[in-house]
Image: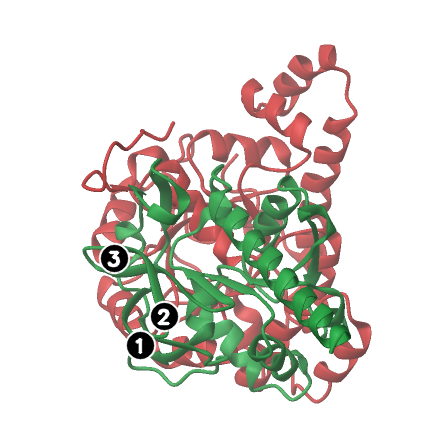
Chain colours: A green, B red
Amino acid sequence: MVNTFTVGILGLQGDFKEHQNMIERLGAKSIVVKHISQLDSIDGLIIPGGESTAIAKLTEDAAVDIFEAMHNKILAGMPVYGTCMGSIFLAKDIEGSCQGRLALMDITVKRNAFGPQKFSREQEIVIPILGPEPFPAVFIRAPIITSCKSSVVILARINEGIIMARQNNMLITSFHPEITDDMRVHQYFLSMLESNKLTNFSEFVYLNRS
Amino acid sequence: MVAQIKNAKDAKTGTELVKKALPQMLKGGVIMDVVNAEQAKVAEAAGAVAVMALERVPADIRADGGVARMSDPELIVQIIDSVSIPVMAKVRIGHFVEAQILQALGVDCIDESEVLTPADDEYHVDKTKFEIPFVCGCRNLGEALRRIGEGAAMIRTKGEAGTGDVVEAVRHARAVLGELRKLTVMPQEELMTYAKNIGAPFELVLQVAKTGKLPVVNFAAGGIATPADAALMMQIGVEGVFVGSGIFKSGDPQKRAEAIVKATTFYNDPEMLANLSRNLGEPMVGRSASSLDAREQLAVRGW
């Protein structure tokens, strides 16, 4: 089933190639998305790691027309996965900042929650939804989710705060699975595409019957 | 090698993976030279992915002459406090104590740079000893792999800083990328001799012969002054650009900074490039790299 999906990776800035490698290793197709026309051919979207202020700047730019369509597609149920910058870009609230973003997920994030690069780190964390084997989480000047509404399911947490969460079709991690060899988070995201497709399909069957 | 971690308490900082990851997040972006907090804010607002804090941009270092050293820590701290994006700063080649100071200040990445006056004409810094990543300059694949062998987590082709002339940046990027392509089709028995000839660690030569790319992120630097220059380097195949004197030595720094960022993002879109290149004001004056005499060339510093 997986190999019938095409995952778009937002390719404006950041480590989108690493995500692309992950998706292709898992047997799905991937395309780097930069233009609005590409959104129609994807089943899900990954917003990669990068600098959130750089992408925020592009949201103010009238010549870059992709964001509104992206916002609407996610709102309509397209699965999306944001890593690090991606989680900031999806958040409704950012502590101390009103920078441009999609503002779709009921979370409040704190940018650079660990401090400068010398406090960036890797850490093995047990994430129940991925199985008993700890996950090698890499935090690079990473954000933390400091609070969220009940609409959000918390999937992993460390002392500093929430580091993985899901709200319906939206998944975020403040760490970077794409730069490790562990493919379980991406696999989990592909399973979200799978159930999204099933849901749509059953709706279609239902409509046909009635 | 990255140590294995047994439980959540064993968070590891400063590992090779963590150091190499920071530049990975900067890919597709522009790193701008800034000399004070105001310029740093302009750079951040324009969409820079990081700033390089220094006392004088390379064009002024050229004009002023004398010894160029690490910047005043006070200035660097002011810049760190003024922005949320990563802050880089330069040390002289081989000056590991300047590097220790920058790490203690909380800089995110250190540039061991030929733009400053070298402190050691034989040895570069042992970069594996540091918790934060280093970026180093190179003119060819051998130099890139030597720096990576010493622990550099990011490479930038040198170009000729402070000239506004992109020709050396092109030469160095083409050299590195061309040699990488050549290696991928080279028969196994030729690799040892090739490693010897370019003065590179054999293990790294073996590795890049297989992958066809450097094991760290590779940006271009030195002479990039216009959006078209940035897009040219991206189309040649680097992963991002450093812009030094090109922005704040131009007529309208903010506008030019924004245009260079956008050109780096949409480097393959000529219509977008045509629109964003309009009315940017005066570019930096510039100086043809071929008019520099041997003592004025910065790229030949380091080996």
Mark 1 chain: A
Q: Which of A18 and B18 is in front in this view?
A: A18
Q: Position of residue A65 (x, y in %)?
A: 68, 83
- Compared to residue A96, the image places residue A188 above or below, namely above
Q: Are marks 2 and 1 on the same chain?
A: yes
Quadrant that contains the N terminus of chain B: top left
- Residues marked 3 and 2 touching at CB (< 8 Å): no
**Three-letter code, disc 2:** Val
- Picture residue at 47% right of the left edge, 39% below the top: A182
User: Distance of mark 1 from mark 3, alpha carbons?
Assistant: 34 Å
Q: Which of B172 and B162 is in front in this view?
A: B172
Q: Would residue B158 be found to the left or right of residue A138 on screen?
A: right
Which residue position holds label 1? A149
Q: Can residue A112 be seen in this view?
A: yes
Badge 2 marks a residue whose secondary structure is loop
- Picture residue at 46% right of the left edge, 70% below the top: A52
Q: Dot 2: few (<14), some (14–19), or many (≥20) neighbours within 10 Å?
A: some
Which residue position holds label 3? B106
Q: On residue A152, which mark appears?
A: 2
**Three-letter code, disc 3:** Gly
- Residues marked 2 and 1 touching at CB (< 8 Å): yes
Q: Where is residue A69 in the image (x, y as percent from the top left)?
A: 65, 81
